[in-house]
Amino acid sequence: MTYTLTTPLYYVNDKPHLGSAYTTLACDALARFQRLMGRPVLFITGCDEHGLKIQRTAEVAGLTPQAHCDLVSDQYRALWQRWQISHDRFIRTTDPRHRLLVEQFYRRVEAAGDVVEGRQRGWYCVACEEFKDDPPEARTPQCSTHQRPLEWRDELNLFFRLSRYQSAIEELIQRPGFIAPASRRREVENFVAQGLRDFSISRLDLPWGIPVPGHQGHTFYVWFDALLGYLTALLEPGDAPDLALLSQRGWPASIHVIGKDILRFHAVYWPAMLLSAGLELPGRVFGHGFLTREGQKMGKSLGNVLDPGELLERCGPDAVRWYLLRDIPFGDDGDVQQQRFSDLVNNDLANTIGNLLNRTSSMARRWFDQAVPSPSEAVGSHHPLAQAAQLAREQVIDGLERLDFRQAAAAALQLAISANGYLNDQAPWSRMKQEGQRQQVADDLYAVLEATRQVALLLAPILPDLSGRMLLQLNQPLAPSGAVAGGQDGPDGEQVPWQQRLTWGSLAAGTPLPEPEPVMARLELDGPL
RNA sequence: GGCUCGGUAGCUCAGCUGGUUAGAGCGUGGGAUUCAUAACCCCAAGGUCGGGAGUUCAAGUCUCCCCCGAGCCA
C-alpha cells in the first residue's frame, strides 16, 4: 500500500518561513526513509492560495491575486528544491482540477444532508479569517493574536453539520496513534467533549475563492478548500477530477504532518468531512511543535525571523537538517540557538562523522594500496563494531518509524562515536610500527570503514547530501531516496535495497579509495544568523 | 476563570509501573595520542531534581497547596 504523507498546504500570504521548512524537511526525511524501506511513497506538499487575506495582500502589492499566488508559490517551489525536498506532488488550490474536485466533494456532503444555512454575525478578524467571540456591543474590538481591529459582519453562510459526527469523532480520536504525539490528544479530547458545533464553510462576497455551487456570492471557506487539496494532489496528470478515483491513487493518507496549531482541523473537522463525503480516514495526524529563537517567539515585530533561504545559503542543507531533526524532539516546541547549532554541527558532523571517514580512509590508503583492506574471519558479526552497527540500525529504523528523528540521528551518530573509540583503542598507527600486526590492522581498518559505510547509509534519510558525499568517498553507490522512482544507481544499474546493504560485511575488500577530502566543513559563522 | 502540558547539572534533555553513590550530549577544566578537518580518545568538576506540606521502611518518581512558563477552551 502506498505510503501517502502530507505537509500542510502553506498559505501564500507571505514568503516561506522557517516553520514551514521545518515541517517540510521532517516530512522529507520520513518520505526518504519510507522509500529506502522499499515502500511506494507519495509525498505531498503545496500551497493554499485562496482567501481574503491573500486578496488584500495582492491588492496592496498592486497585483492580481493569481499573479501574487504564482509569485509566492514559486518561492516555495524554489525553496524546496534548494532544500532537496523530495516531494512527489506540489498542489496549488488554484489548480483548475481542484475546483472541480471541491465541487464534487461539496455535492456529496450536501447529498448527505450535512450542509445547512445559518446566519453568522459578529466581529471578524481578516487576518485569522474567522469570527471572534467579542460581544456585539464592543466598540473597537481587536484581534488578540493579530492586534488588529475587527470588522463587523452579518451574513448568511453555509454550515457543515459537524455536530452529527460527535460520536464518530469521539471514537476516532481514541484510536491509538491517530493523534500523535499522544501528549496532544487530551487537548483534542477536551475540545470534542465540549460538544461539536457546526462550522461555517462559506463566505459571502469574497471573490478570491472557489464558488459554492448553487449559492450565488458564496465561496468556500478555508477548510472546505485547502484540506481538499490533499485529495486533488493525488490525481495523476491525465486523471479526471473524480473522488471515486482516489482510493487507487494513494488515499487514505498514512499521515498528515502539521503544526500543532491546526491539529483540531485535521483531527476533527477533516475526518468528519471525509466521513460525510464517504471517503476513508487518514491513518495519523502528527502535530509537531513550534520553533522559537534564543528563547523568543520569532516574529516580524521582533525582527528575529530566521529566513530559511538565507539559512540554507550560509550553512548548507546538512547543517540545518541535522540541527532541527537531531536536537529538537519532533512534537515538542524547540528553541533554535545559534551557539548550539554550530556546536552540534561541528561536533557531530565535522568532527565525529566527517573526521572518522577522513582518518580511516587516509590510513587504509597509506598502508593498503589505496584500497579497502582484506579482513580476516575475525571481522564477523560478533565484531564489536558489527554489534554496534546492528544496534544503530535497529534504533534508526525504529526511530524513523515513530517520527523520532532525534533517536534516529543519535543512533547513527553513536555508531560513529563507537568507531572512533575503537580506532583509538586499537591504535593501528602504533601497530603498523610493530612486526606481525599487519593483518590486525587490516581487520581494524576494515571494520571501521564498514561501520562508516553504515553510518553513511543510516544517515541517508536525514542527511541525503552528506550521506552521498560519504558514500562517494567510500566508492560506494549512493542510496537513492528521492522522488524519482527507479533512479540509475551503480555501474550495473541494479539497486541493492537499502536494508540489504546494511548487512554487516557488505563492503568489498579491495575497493579502491579515492583521496579523502573533508565531507563536512566546520561551520564558521561570522555574525548572527 | 476551567483544563492540559512542562519546571532535573551553565545549555538541550533522559529518568518505565516509587528502591543502592540522579544520567547523556554540548559547554568548561585536565590528561593521553598523532591516523585525521587544532580533529579523535580518556578523566574530572558541576544538581538541596521550582517551593512547601503529606503518604511510605523508602519519592525527581504518588497526594495536596503554592510559584513560574507554554498551550487549549471560555
Image (tube, coloured by chain):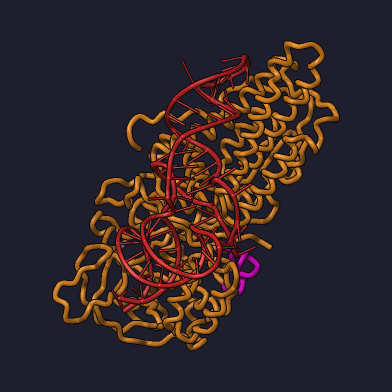
Chain colours: A orange, B red
Residue drawn at x 71%, y 18% as measured from the top left: A370
**Viewer-nearest residue: A251 or A292:** A292
Q: Quadrant of residue A438?
A: top right
**Against A272, is A391 above or below?**
above
**Viewer-nearest residue: A340 or A240:** A340
The residue most toward the right is: A377
Note whether residue A268 is visible: yes
Magenta residue check for A50: no
- The quarter of the picture where the C terminus of chain A appears is top left
**Against A213, is A447 above or below?**
above
- The quarter of the picture where the N terminus of chain A appears is bottom right
In the image, residue A218 lies at what x, y percent? 34, 78
Note whether residue A71 is visible: no
In the image, residue A124 lies at what x, y percent? 26, 73
**Viewer-nearest residue: A6 or A460:** A460
Lateral position of residue A502 relative to residue A468, left or right: right
Query: What number of labels is visible?
Result: 0
In the image, residue A497 lies at what x, y percent? 74, 45
Which residues fall within the magenta stretch? A243-255
Magenta residue check for A250: yes
Residue drawn at x 70%, y 29% as measured from the top left: A448
Residue drawn at x 51%, y 41% as measured from the top left: A322
**Viewer-nearest residue: A515 or A387:** A387
